[in-house]
Amino acid sequence: MNCEELVSLALEQGFANAAVVETKDIPFVPGFRICCEDNTCGKYGANYSCPPDCGSPADMEQKAKSHRYALLLQTMWQMDDAMDSAALKTSKGQHNRMVRRLIDQLSEVSHGIMVGASGCNLCNPCAITAGEPCRFPDKQFSCMSAYCVYVEKLAEDCGMEYDSGPGIVNFFGMYLFDWNDAKEPHA
């Protein structure tokens, strides 16, 4: 399987868009950590996959760049009210399940890690709240914000719309991977 086949598989799985990039080309902005520190999602300090426990912005960038490639994945959701937190949570959950299913399919031919549309939600609440170790260290995932990825720029660089207009909400995730037989991504 090469990069074009990987993108095709993602599209067949229902993603609106997909693209393979080298991790060295991902725009990281450490100042975006403030988005997590604002704690609008309620996971700051309450989830192993979120700051401060996931690592510093430099740690997260290094973690991403420890893999050569990233498969950027986009889903689009029809939503009358983009501020409807229940609908947003449901859509993000569906997005992350789609990413996980795709990664599970690829596990026999590639090795990597998931980056989600929000922090890990495998356990509710996260084991950190009880002072216990992570129950799923091989499956836990951090969000694009925890990695300090400039998602709008990355989407633009990959030919994807970040803002699709009224009534459409976009979510982005990534699969960071190494694949010995992957061909160089096409620009």
Image (spheres, grey):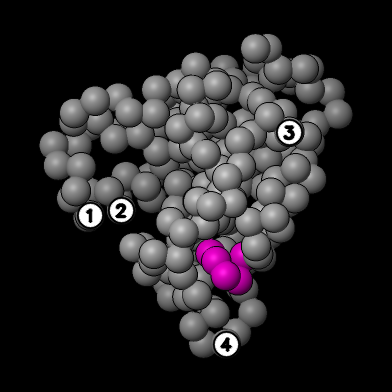
Residue at horizontal 86 percent and vertical 29 percent from the top = 180
Label 4 and label 2: CA atoms lie apart by 26 Å
Write down the quadrant of residue 51 in the picture.
Answer: bottom right
* Magenta stretch contains residue 115: no
Mark 1 and 2 residues: CB-CB less than 8 Å, in contact? yes
Circle 3 — which element? Answer: helix
Q: Residue at x 64, y 79 (%)?
A: 133
Question: Of the residues tagged 4 and 3, which is closer to the observer?
Answer: 3
Q: Quadrant of the N terminus?
A: top right
Query: In terms of sequence position, does the residue under pointer 4 or pointer 2 come before the other?
Result: 2
Where is mark 4, residue-wise? 131
* Residue 99 relative to residue 105: left or right: left
Magenta span covers which residues?
Answer: 50-54
- Whichever of labels 4 and 3 marks the residue nearer the N terminus, that label is 3
Q: Nearer the viewer, mark 2 or mark 3?
A: 3
Callout 1 amino acid: Ser
Q: Badge 2 is on which residue?
A: 89
The label nearer to you, 3 versus 1, is 3
